[in-house]
């Protein structure tokens, strides 16, 4: 089954009529600013060129200090870029229809596994199966654990995955830099 989001743009709320398999071709952390994301990607590219301070955290890996709260106690705040992130997914179905999907109500556990060596928790080109009855709001899929299954990168997807993930750090740095420049 395919998914054409343009069919749902005029409907405030709808539901998928059957299971749909998608490739994840884009992944964005919408819970952190683009500037914070850019810093994170630059850290992966070259940790020595990141313009932030570091503090030794009791003998463990150096923790990056991105901001300082001068107004109150910061002890109860979760560290940046942990499992607190919320993601927007760019999906492509088997008929080359593209759509967006957001984590909705609960977090998708496969986006918390961290199986890559980049800020992306999963490799692009991975497949997911969206089950019948998944909520669609104005053409956007709203994903939750009960209605979404992670299938990973299948053998026939290796070429797509390699194409999407090759040079991913530079791609994201370029994208975020241009996006921040254009938003001024």
Image (cartoon, rainbow, N blue to C red):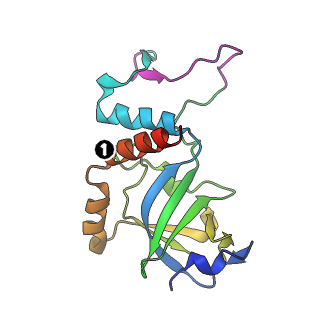
Please state which of residues 30 and 77 is positioned toward the viewer in this rendering. 30
Please identify the dominant SS of the magenta region. loop
Please give left or right for residue 127 compared with residue 135 in the image. Answer: left
Please state which of residues 20 and 34 is positioned toward the viewer in this rendering. 34
Please give left or right for residue 127 compared with residue 14 in the image. Answer: left
Q: Is residue 94 visible?
A: yes
Whole-percent x, y for residue 54 in the image = 42, 17
The crowding category of the residue bearing disc 1, from other C-alpha atoms within 10 Å (few below 14, some 14 to 19, many at least 20), is: some
Q: Is residue 152 above or below residue 38?
A: below
Please give left or right for residue 112 compared with residue 123 in the image. Answer: right
Q: Is residue 77 above or below residue 57?
A: below
Q: Is residue 61 magenta?
A: yes
Q: Is residue 180 magenta?
A: no
Q: Which residues are magenta?
A: 59-76
Query: Which residue is labeled 1 in the image?
Result: 170
Whole-percent x, y for residue 61 in the image = 39, 23
Question: Residue at position x 64%, y 18% from top?
Answer: 69
Q: Is residue 131 visible?
A: no
Q: Is residue 61 above or below residue 137?
A: above
Whole-percent x, y for residue 78 in the image = 60, 31
Question: Residue at position x 47%, y 55% from top?
Answer: 27
Question: Residue at position x 50%, y 83% from top?
Answer: 2
Whole-percent x, y for residue 165 in the image = 30, 55
Badge 1 element = helix
Quadrant of res 42: top left
Please state which of residues 94 and 126 is positioned toward the viewer in this rendering. 94
Please give left or right for residue 100 compared with residue 164 in the image. Answer: right
Question: Residue at position x 37%, y 56% from top?
Answer: 123
Quadrant of res 31: top right
């Amino acid at each position: 089954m395919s998914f054409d989001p343009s069919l749902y743009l005029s409907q405030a709320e709808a539901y998928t009529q059957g299971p749909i398999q998608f490739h994840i071709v884009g992944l964005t952390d919408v819970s952190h600013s683009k500037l914070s994301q850019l810093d994170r990607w630059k850290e992966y590219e070259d940790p020595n060129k990141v313009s932030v301070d570091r503090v030794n955290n009791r003998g463990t890996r150096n923790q990056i200090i991105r901001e300082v709260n001068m107004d109150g106690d910061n002890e109860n705040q979760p560290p940046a870029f942990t499992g607190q992130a919320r993601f927007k997914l760019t999906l492509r179905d088997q008929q080359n229809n593209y759509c967006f999907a957001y984590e909705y109500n609960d977090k998708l556990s496969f986006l918390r596994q961290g199986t890559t060596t980049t800020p992306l928790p999963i490799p692009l080109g991975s497949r997911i199966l969206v089950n019948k009855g998944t909520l669609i709001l104005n053409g956007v899929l709203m994903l939750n654990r009960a209605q979404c299954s992670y299938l990973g990168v299948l053998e026939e997807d290796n070429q797509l995955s390699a194409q999407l993930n090759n040079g991913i750090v530079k791609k994201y740095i370029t994208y975020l830099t241009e996006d921040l420049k254009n938003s001024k």
